[in-house]
Amino acid sequence: MRTIYIRKDINNFQRKILLDMAYLAEHNMIRLLKFYFEDNLYLPFYKSIKDRSSFDKFYLTRDKIVKEDDNHYFFKFPFKPQQVEGVD
């Protein structure tokens, strides 16, 4: 599995947070450390695997948190890894 980053646009800068790929592959969920969580974090994905001309943003918001523990928030990963846009 390739590396996948969550992103946040800040003015002309793009912040990238590496996902825990081992956890994602095993549980098909995003595990994010609580101190990384903030507004407007998103995961860019292609709407279709075959059509890579347009992509959408899957925002990680509090209402999408499936569960949490002392250190992490957990989100469902609702698409296939091939749909996630690669890093430039």
Image (tube, grey):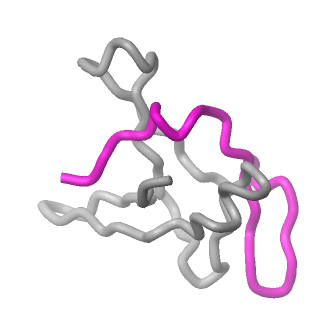
> Vertical placement of 64 versus 53: above or below?
below
- Give left or right: position of 59 versus 46: right
What residue is rendered at 45% in x and 70% in y? 18
| Magenta-span inclusion, residue 22 | no
Closer to us: 62 or 88: 88
What residue is rendered at 44% in x and 39% in y? 84
> Vertical placement of 45 versus 26: above or below?
above
Q: Where is residue 66 in the image (x, y as percent from the top left)?
A: 84, 53
> Vertical placement of 19 versus 87: above or below?
below
Closer to us: 8 or 19: 19
Q: Give the range drawn in magenta.
A: 63-88
Q: Position of residue 52 (x, y in %)?
A: 29, 21
Q: Where is residue 58 in the image (x, y as percent from the top left)?
A: 52, 40
Q: Position of residue 2 (x, y in %)?
A: 43, 55
Q: Quadrant of residue 49?
A: top left
Q: Quadrant of residue 22?
A: bottom right
